[in-house]
Image: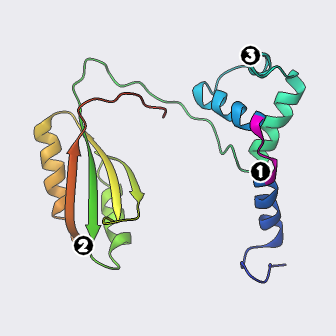
């Protein structure tokens, strides 16, 4: 049965409300610890949170069941000796062209992330290439995509920290 105002199934709406209502300070600390090290043992997490192992295990299971934790991933280290150039790119698009532009951006291996944003621009990208010349070529390719109206890029000089 759908709820009258949202169009979402009632069960989905109830889970969303439950998820928001049950995320307490301990859950937030647990999530932060898992973001820091998703491979931390239940025992280590329990010790840091000053909780029992069963309690921590149940909280993780509940966070997973409620869709707060969607999964765990492996983050590959970059070759520290390999030079890379990165840039943040802001794009303004022709109206109704966002889907087509995003599909083309998705095919470019140098585009690491693509975010829809508010403000003067429509999309924010993180791009990476081995050298500045390669980065420049990727920027030229992006600027010339059909539907891209305006582009502003900023070269990343230093990454101070990265929580990804």
Is residue 82 shown above or below 94? above
Cα separation, mark 2 vs mark 1, equals 38 Å
Is residue 116 shown above or below 111? below
Is residue 3 shown above or below 32? below
Residue at the image position 62 percent from the left and 36 percent from the top: 72
Cα separation, mark 2 vs mark 3, equals 50 Å
Q: Secondary structure at mark 2?
A: loop
Q: Specify few, some or many for label 3: CA neighbours under 10 Å numbering under 14, 14-19, or 20 or more.
A: few
How far across and down, in percent of the image, does residue 29 sit? Answer: 70, 31
Is the N terminus in the top left, top right, bottom left or bottom right quadrant?
bottom right
Q: Magenta stretch mostly in which secondary structure?
A: helix
Q: Is residue 162 left or right of residue 31?
A: left
Which callout, 2 or 3, points at the residue further toward the start of the chain? 3
Residue at the image position 32 percent from the left and 75 percent from the top: 97
125 or 71, which is in the foreground? 125
Q: Is residue 20 left or right of residue 53?
A: left
Quadrant of the image occupied by residue 38: top right
Q: Specify few, some or many for label 1: CA neighbours under 10 Å numbering under 14, 14-19, or 20 or more.
A: some
Quadrant of the image occupied by residue 144: bottom left
Q: Looking at this view, name the residue that lies furthest to the bottom.
A: 4
Q: Pointer 1: what residue?
A: 66
Residues shaded magenta: 21-25
Cα separation, mark 1 vs mark 3, equals 23 Å
Quadrant of the image occupied by residue 4: bottom right
Residue at the image position 29 percent from the left and 52 percent from the top: 108
Q: Pointer 3: what residue?
A: 44
Q: Secondary structure at mark 3?
A: helix
Mark linked to residue 147? 2
Q: Are marks 1 and 3 in contact (CB under 8 Å)?
A: no
């Amino acid at each position: 049965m759908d709820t009258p105002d949202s169009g979402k199934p009632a069960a989905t709406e109830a889970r969303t409300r439950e998820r928001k209502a049950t995320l307490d300070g301990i859950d937030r600390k647990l999530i932060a610890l898992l973001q820091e090290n998703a491979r931390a043992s239940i025992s280590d997490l329990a010790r840091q949170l000053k909780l029992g192992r069963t309690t921590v295990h149940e909280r993780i299971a509940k966070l997973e069941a409620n869709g707060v934790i969607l999964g765990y991933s492996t983050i590959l280290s970059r070759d520290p000796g390999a030079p890379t150039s990165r840039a943040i790119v802001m794009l303004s698009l022709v109206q109704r062209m966002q889907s087509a532009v995003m599909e083309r951006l998705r095919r470019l291996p140098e585009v690491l992330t693509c975010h829809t944003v508010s403000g003067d621009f429509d999309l924010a990208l993180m791009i990476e290439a081995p050298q500045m010349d390669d980065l420049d070529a990727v920027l030229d390719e992006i600027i010339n995509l059909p539907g891209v109206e305006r582009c502003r890029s900023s070269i990343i000089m230093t990454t101070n920290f990265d929580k990804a």
